[in-house]
Amino acid sequence: MCGIFGLISKENLEIGEIALEGIKRLEYRGYDSCGICFQNGGKLTIRKVSGKINNIQEKFNIKSLSGHLAIAHTRWATHGAPTEYNSHPHTDCTGEIALVHNGIIENFMELKKELQEKGHQFQSETDTEILPHLIEDFLKNGASFKEAVIKTLKRCTGAYGIAVCYAKKPDMMIVARKESPIVIGIEEGKKSYCASDIPAILPYTRSCYILEDDELAILQPGEAKFYNIENGMNEILKEPEYIKWSVDDAQKNGYEHFMLKEIFEEPRAIRNTLNIKKEDIELFAQHLLSADHIYITAAGTSYYASLAGKYMITNFLGKYIQSIECSEFQNNLQGALEENSVIIAVSQSGETADTIEAIRWAKNAQKNIKILAITNIVGSSLTRYSDHFIITRAGPEIGVASTKTYIAQVITLALVALEIAKIKQEVSPEDLENYYSALRSTPTIIEQFLEKNTAYVKHIVTNLEKNINYFFLARGISIATAKEGGLKLKEVACRFIEGYSAAHAKHGPISLVREGFPIIFIAPPDETYERLVGNVMEFKARGGFIISVVVESDKKITELSDVTIRIPQPPTQFYNLLSPITFIPALQLLSYYAALEHDLDPDKPLNLAKTVTVH
Ligand code: G6P
């Protein structure tokens, strides 16, 4: 939800190009409009456009602009349409204060009314615009720049990551955070950067400071000072975190799109994630073994990874795990959250507002709840609000629709499931080794699949192009794959899909099936297979066009299908349990090529943002 980038440098430089590059690296957070403010010689210059980031270069030749300070913003509209005038940076009445914001100021209506009564003129419909006006007001009353920002933030409720500059203080930029991420990078003695996420500052430094909630930083060229917003007097000492990602990880490296690159990076993401510290996996397993009640919560793709993981863990744990979408967590458990529960929270970004709210609410219930988090981002909010966390090793994911991070989440949950099996000793040592061996084979299976089938999947898509509606059906653990595969097609190719239980689909969805209606069956040869054969026949009998994802040795469903996609894995229980990992690349590829077929940009699906920091 919106990306912020800021830079302050000792010397004048081609700041336009750097600022543009900065927000481009954050474009996955929102891409409906953007804007940049430059400071040169005590004067602020602001440029804004609606639409994609490239528009700002085309209209204003931003790259040619020089200066020593810039703040920039790429927007995902919440309050006010994605027009030029609603784009950030927003300014005060004098035009001397410019500010970019990620988040929502919930009490902006009251504050706006109060400011209007004092004579402030507003140019936009945004909640953000009250911030520079409030700062202006406090400055007028004698506050310093820092005091004015602190006093302003104390009056606001809601969430913010902000960067603000003031024409009269050309050598300083202030950034602050409450629930919306801000990271800071320093090139000592020369330049300071701030951004909503690590990839934007990765080309300049790998060591970064992560602002915590209610913290504010004063950036000067090559240095940063940190304060608490409640007690702005005393400086806080913070240690930087070292980021292992490389700049190349966040580049397309010859691929046409990030989505395709990230699908092809899945084997590497798995191999790296399999190296998560054993002690962390064991700690998760022990908590689950001793828990009285277990919940798993997440949003979007992470939720479907949770569904797959829940099946895997339950298989060995023998306890029920209740999966609840994070946005409904509190509504479901109001008055019913049990003592001594463990909550597993899964989030790629670690910043999804509803996931964070769910676990904070549970923690505040004072019922001895333990939060176990799985996230891809070091220092994210989720790591701060959890009791224990595991960082998946997928590397930076830039495509808005998650691909390799889904796989890394499922791998992590599979490791926890197998650790539980190991501790409980109910599975024989040979079988346990067979499961581990199958898990270690997943990257090779995916590599072989991608090598042999990418062109074939592209070809299938060309023939399906005319269809608008799809069903993705499965039974058992593969329901997670059906839902996630369907979500991908919905997100990037704008098709209407229903990801559903194959058995339950006869209670409603089947009424839509006519001659040629495409139905994708996810069909590993597990204990649900024979019944799934029956479901395939039900849909075929009604004219459905059957596309099945099966293992290479499959016969029955293959015979019933119009098209099959074959996954090169042995037909054993050990591999079947891991099919959410090995089957999903086929569906991700299908969605990728479907997006291209419809002239859509798979990296930037319409109306979506990668990190959703609003409720
Ligand atoms: C958004 C993104 C999805 C993502 C979901 C949850 O909807 O577009 O790709 O799965 O948020 O995000 P998280 O960072 O919590 O995994």
Image (cartoon, grey):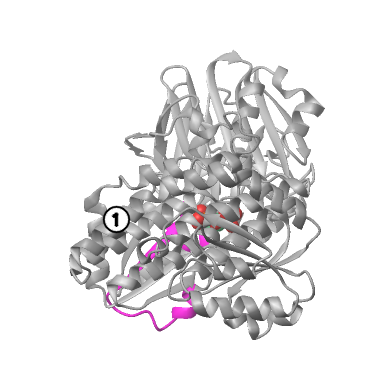
In the image, 49 versus 264, the foreground residue is 264
Q: Position of residue 215 (x, y in %)?
A: 43, 44
Q: Position of residue 473 (x, y in %)?
A: 60, 71
The structure residue drawn at horizontal position 45% and vertical position 80%, both measured from the top left corner, is: 334
The structure residue drawn at horizontal position 69% and vertical position 76%, both measured from the top left corner, is: 540
Residue 432 appears in the figure: yes
- Residue 88, image quadrant: top right
What span is colored magenta in the figure?
A: 329-355
- Residue 44, image quadrant: top right
User: On the picture, is 197 further left or further right than 413?
Assistant: right
Amino acid type at image mark 1? Tyr
Q: Secondary structure at mark 1?
A: helix
User: On the picture, is 166 further left or further right than 270?
Assistant: right
Q: Which residue is mark 1?
A: 436
Whether disc 1's CB lies below 8 Å from ligand 1 is answered no
In the image, 428 versus 361, the foreground residue is 428
In the image, 537 versus 354, the foreground residue is 537
Q: Residues within 10 Å of mark 1 (few under 14, many from 20)?
A: some
In the image, 82 versus 601, the foreground residue is 601
